[in-house]
Image: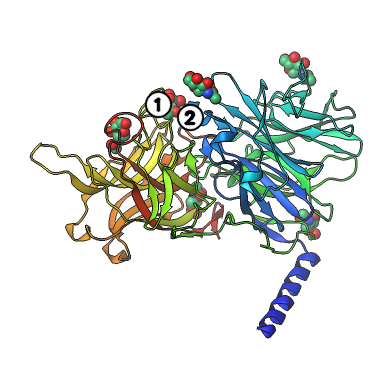
Amino acid sequence: MKLLLAFLSLALGILAESYQTGNATFYNPALPGWHSDPSCIRRDDTFFCVTSTFIAFPGLPVYASKDLRNWRLISHVWNRESQLPGVSWNTTQQQQGMYAATIREHKGEIYVVCEYLGLSQGIIGVLFKTKDPFNDAAWSDPVTFSPKKIDPDLFWDDDGTLYVATQGIILQKLDMETGELSQPPISLWNGTGGVWPEGPHIYKKDGYYYLLIAEGGTAEDHSITMARSRKLTGPYEAYAGNPVLTARGTQRYFQTVGHGDLFTDKAGNWWGMCLATRSGPAYEIYPMGREAVLFPVTWEEGEWPVMQTIEGRMSGWPTMPPPNRRIPGDGPFVADPDSYDFEAGSSIPKNLIHWRVPAEGAFKISKKGLQVTPSRANLTGTPFGNVETSGQRGLSFIARRQTDTLFTYSVDLVSKPKNANEEAGVSVFLTQVNHLDLGVVQLPPTKPSEEPQLAFRFRVTSDNVPIAVPEPHIVPVPAAWKQSNLRLQISTSNNVTYEFSAMKAGHPESAIKMGTASAQLVSGGNGTFVGSLVGAYATCNGAGKGVDCPRGEPAVFSRWRYTGKGQQISINEVV
Ligand SMILES: *[C@@H]1O[C@H](CO)[C@@H](O)[C@H](O)[C@H]1NC(C)=O
Ligand SMILES: *[C@@H]1O[C@H](CO)[C@@H](O)[C@H](O)[C@H]1NC(C)=O
Ligand SMILES: *[C@@H]1O[C@H](CO)[C@@H](O)[C@H](O)[C@H]1NC(C)=O
Ligand SMILES: *[C@@H]1O[C@H](CO)[C@@H](O)[C@H](O)[C@H]1NC(C)=O
Ligand SMILES: *[C@@H]1O[C@H](CO)[C@@H](O)[C@H](O)[C@H]1NC(C)=O
Ligand SMILES: *[C@@H]1O[C@H](CO)[C@@H](O)[C@H](O)[C@H]1NC(C)=O
């Protein structure tokens, strides 16, 4: 043991040294999978980032890292329905909810400001704070305010006054206690002419107020541009070298580069995080949507920052801290696999999320595994406005982000649907109208004399995509499997195709191929701001009345596995 420790410390010492003698290598995306609009800070030796989550719940994940490579999910800022009562269930659209957040530290507390879209009363600004970002429960209920525009920044000037800049770009003082915003807003800068000047962040450096914004829309024309002024309220002078960072008009694999934030490491070197999409210039297939990427920034005194072009493999500053996974908390690191058996007494893993706040008690861990009470609404539901079947009152869906280009995901179904139309399955889910499902379903009889039939069903729903949707495929569950757990599996056969199969749990040789689907079916569509989730659902497909299924017997899942098998980091390289 002693010898092993001695060897380990020697090895780590050599490793640490090698990071100080040359530029360190790191890979993008730093936060793989749907992680849009990152905002980051450093406190002592720990970096913290928050990202956008729209209607997903819990929302606004906070990741912590000591080395800028290993990022642990430590909490969600929005983690209790009681923080914003009734808000989630009143939100109808797929891409409303929590837009771009900003994270900042002030006087020992960490603040996250964000804006919630989709309610009839207009945009609600929300300012949360905590002394302990490692603990969900420590995030406060928000102070709310009424901004006119999205993407709030937080900036405390030297005299302690708090300012919020938003899309436009406009500036207002914010009273942290009452939520009062100063009027009228001051117009700071309109950007360089790209659409949607937004996502502002203000930094004070070398006697200047630097304003960093996103411009050009969040797709191929996205960019970061900057302006500066000696006075916070302007006039702002645009940088002659704008855009500071973009992939616009390039053939690069990482497209849509923009919407970023800057911070320093302990050695004083600058870094940035922004969003990018791994689509290549074709910008057709990008199931993971907008991901967070890291880049070194050179920012000399009195000068404009110079940002390194976003690539899959990057050279960081030699001061990049050596690998270090000593981050407290029970959440997983973003790039780690899942291996969840849902043992009695365990809690629901932190990286598993829902589409809107779920119905109370819909997800429970019991002796048998993860119990999911089916929702009457299936993943698609009916058009919005019908709260009973649209999914607005919570969907029984639990999922993680697809974080790898290539992966295998499977879960075992321990119980089987008993009543007609009941279904339990797995899905690659972008929005309620863009999802690829493999379910075990009790197909209702076509004639009164028949019994319902237990079947595997592969079924694709995809709106607003320019390719054909595959036909459903139904295979009766073999009679000999009726006493066994059933394993439902989604894997990638290449960087653009998913493969769905069903088998007797523990018997890969029994696998029935249920279908394949192009990743284009979950790219863009009705979810241009979000990214694919993979997970499990239970529903009765609209049977009965009200919000709940007529019998509502829970589906039970166990042995949840997700393993990354490869990341595409350039047009021709997978690592
Ligand atoms: C949600 O909608 C209901 C019905 O329109 C309304 O009474 C309630 O105030 C709304 N709640 C919120 C938080 O918007
Ligand atoms: C930005 O554009 C608006 C609308 O045209 C204008 O009122 C405002 O003065 C402009 N702001 C600046 C700083 O130029
Ligand atoms: C890495 O090394 C190159 C070549 O020596 C240098 O130009 C660059 O500034 C260094 N730092 C980063 C962050 O790449
Ligand atoms: C999907 O997008 C289409 C076209 O923009 C829109 O008409 C439809 O309402 C959207 N569906 C949902 C469920 O958001
Ligand atoms: C999903 O639910 C709706 C009604 O809520 C129903 O019309 C539709 O057929 C269901 N889909 C499937 C695959 O059963
Ligand atoms: C998939 O791989 C092919 C071949 O390496 C490459 O040309 C293409 O850009 C990749 N597509 C995506 C979306 O990664």
Considering every residue shown, the one lying at the far left of the view is: 449
Mark 2: secondary structure = helix
The image's mark for residue 534 is none
* Residue linked to disc 1: 387
Q: Residue at x 67, y 59 (%)?
A: 327
Residue at left offset 27%, top offset 42%: 422
Name the spot of residue 34 as percent of width and height, x first.
Answer: 55, 44
Instruction: Name the residue type under label 2.
Output: Trp
Q: Quadrant of the N terminus?
A: bottom right
Residue 516: x and y in percent read: 34, 49
Which residue is at the front of the view, 484 or 380?
484
Res. 114 image quadrant:
top right
According to the image, label 2 marks what residue? 89
Residue 116 lies, with reference to residue 532, above or below; the image says: above
Determine whether the beta carbon of the residue marked 2 sits less than 8 angstroms from the nearest atom of ligand 1: yes
The local crowd at label 2, few if under 14, some if 14 to 19, many if 20 or more residues have their Cα within 10 Å, is: some
Query: Left or right of 123: which side holds 386?
Result: left
Q: Are marks 2 and 1 in contact (CB under 8 Å)?
A: yes
Q: Closer to the camera, 222 or 2? A: 2
Q: Nearer the viewer, residue 18 or 481?
A: 481
Residue 11 position, x and y percent, is: 71, 76
Residue 218 visible within the image: yes
| Ligand 5 found in image quarter | top left
